[in-house]
């Protein structure tokens, strides 16, 4: 089946769903067994064979299994672990690949909370982190150490939008014996399949486009047989459990992912091209644009682009950006993205970068282009840029 069909049909099980189209919300902790033999069989199937059978609520219900199977089909992996948030997906993926004394490589454009985890808690556990230039490609070989076990990528980065050469990085990492994990939230498995590019783990903050309505938190990790086994062990040991209510919302959102992303991409391209014509704008950070430095890699490895982009001004100030943002009507200020609505956030990555300096004027802005009419969005941004220019003087 093609992607759009898998989005709609993936994970459906008429018997498990009690004949309903969407798997109902199954809440519960305790599963009752008819006999000792039956309990032992369920434990064996659930833990040793990793089958999706009723055993204990923390290990999943039919509500969870539907989403897990659907994501696994889309990603092309062996299995999927669900987590309570996107950040939890990043941290569990890392913990599933490391032990005390190991070394990992992490892209310098990584999501800030992931960097905080690596530089803080992971360091306290005895794992060393080295940050690398997002554009390093196969040159990452030079950073490998004898104890390097993981390369963590985020392509494109959600603030600076650099596209990483995942096939080249994966080839170098695997030659060294290290695994590769990719935070694929921007593209979703509809527009990019990191496992097909050579990665071992593909991570989604399902809170964003999979849920699609800004009303639930969830993360997904899909991987190869070997890699996902380590993640499952780490997640289980940490007591991972995801609310079936949030899983239900994510599954419902997944079914419309194709049509939503098509509109997000169409709208984002329209707004991005308009922004390129503005005298205040130095660069629009959006890999789908021909002018973007990562466009060639994006065209090679991606099937489309989502609605998230960045804007760098020729000259900027905190006061000018605040004047623009505070008066926007259709771009509320918020940290997340991926819902049906447009959003704006400030970007100033200079302080967090440690390997490859970010030299663009700050602050810039990050826009999530939602499903509204682009004429209205552009009119709102046009007024905002007038306020920006006036405040800049």
Image: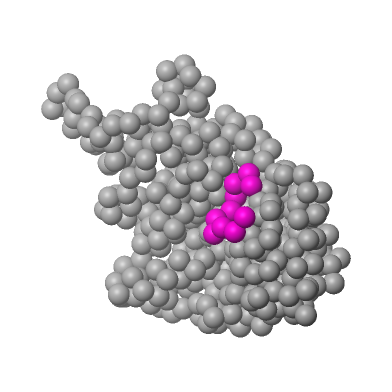
Q: Is residue 35 left or right of residue 172?
A: left
Question: Can you say which quadrant of the picture contains the N terminus?
Answer: top right
Q: Is residue 33 left or right of residue 288?
A: left
Quarter of image, res 9: top right
Q: Position of residue 101 (x, y in %)?
A: 31, 75
Of all residues, the one furthest to the top in this rendering is 19
Q: Is residue 117 left or right of residue 198?
A: left
Question: Can you say which quadrant of the picture contains the C terminus?
Answer: bottom right
> What residue is rendered at 52% in x and 77% in y?
352
Q: Position of residue 225 (x, y in %)?
A: 43, 49
- Between 12 and 229, the residue placed more toward the observer is 12
Quarter of image, res 149: bottom left
- Between 30 and 179, the residue placed more toward the observer is 30
Above or below, 380 against 62 in this view is: below
- Residues rendered magenta in the picture: 332-341
Quarter of image, res 334: bottom right
Can the viewer see residue 173? no
Can the viewer see residue 387? yes
- 338 in the magenta segment: yes
Q: Position of residue 39 (x, y in %)?
A: 18, 30
Above or below, 324 against 21 in this view is: below
- 115 in the magenta segment: no
Q: Which colour style is shown?
A: one colour
Q: Position of residue 79 (x, y in %)?
A: 44, 44
- Between 298 and 287, the residue placed more toward the observer is 287
Above or below, 324 against 81 in this view is: below
> What residue is rendered at 74% in x and 78% in y?
392
Of all residues, the one furthest to the left in this rendering is 36
Magenta stretch secondary structure, dominant = loop
């Amino acid at each position: 089946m093609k992607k759009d069909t898998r989005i709609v049909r993936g994970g459906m099980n008429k018997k498990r769903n009690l004949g309903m189209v969407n798997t109902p919300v199954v809440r519960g902790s305790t599963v009752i067994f008819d006999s000792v033999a039956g309990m032992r069989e369920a434990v064996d199937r659930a833990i040793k064979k990793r089958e999706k059978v009723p055993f204990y609520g923390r290990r999943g219900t039919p509500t969870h299994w539907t989403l897990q199977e659907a994501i696994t089909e889309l990603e092309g992996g062996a299995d999927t672990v669900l987590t309570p948030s996107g950040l939890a997906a990043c941290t569990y993926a890392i913990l599933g690949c490391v032990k005390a004394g190991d070394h990992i490589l992490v892209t310098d454009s990584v999501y800030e909370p992931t960097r905080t985890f690596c530089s803080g808690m992971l360091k306290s556990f005895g794992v060393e982190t080295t940050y690398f230039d997002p554009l390093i490609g196969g040159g990452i070989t030079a950073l490998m150490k004898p104890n390097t076990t993981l390369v963590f990528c985020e392509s494109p980065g959600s603030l600076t939008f650099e596209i990483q050469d995942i096939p080249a990085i994966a080839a170098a990492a695997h030659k060294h014996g290290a695994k590769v994990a990719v935070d694929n939230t921007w593209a979703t498995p509809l527009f990019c399949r990191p496992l097909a590019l050579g990665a071992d783990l593909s991570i989604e903050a399902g809170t964003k486009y999979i849920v699609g309505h800004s009303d639930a938190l969830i993360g997904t990790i899909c991987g190869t047989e070997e890699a996902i086994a380590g993640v499952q062990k780490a997640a289980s040991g940490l007591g991972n459990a995801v609310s079936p209510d949030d899983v239900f919302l994510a599954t419902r959102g997944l079914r419309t992912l194709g049509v939503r992303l098509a509109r997000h991409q169409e709208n984002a391209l329209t707004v991005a091209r308009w922004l390129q014509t503005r005298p205040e704008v130095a660069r629009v950070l959006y890999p789908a644009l021909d002018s973007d430095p990562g466009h060639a890699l994006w065209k090679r490895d991606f099937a489309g682009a989502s609605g998230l982009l960045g804007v760098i001004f020729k000259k900027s100030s905190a006061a000018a950006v605040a004047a623009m943002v505070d008066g926007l009507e259709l771009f509320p200020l918020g940290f997340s993205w991926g819902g049906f609505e447009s959003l704006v956030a400030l970007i100033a990555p200079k302080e967090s970068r440690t390997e490859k300096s970010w030299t663009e004027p700050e602050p810039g802005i990050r826009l999530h282009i939602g499903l509204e009419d682009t004429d209205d969005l552009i009119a709102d941004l046009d007024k905002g840029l007038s306020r920006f220019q006036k405040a800049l003087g």
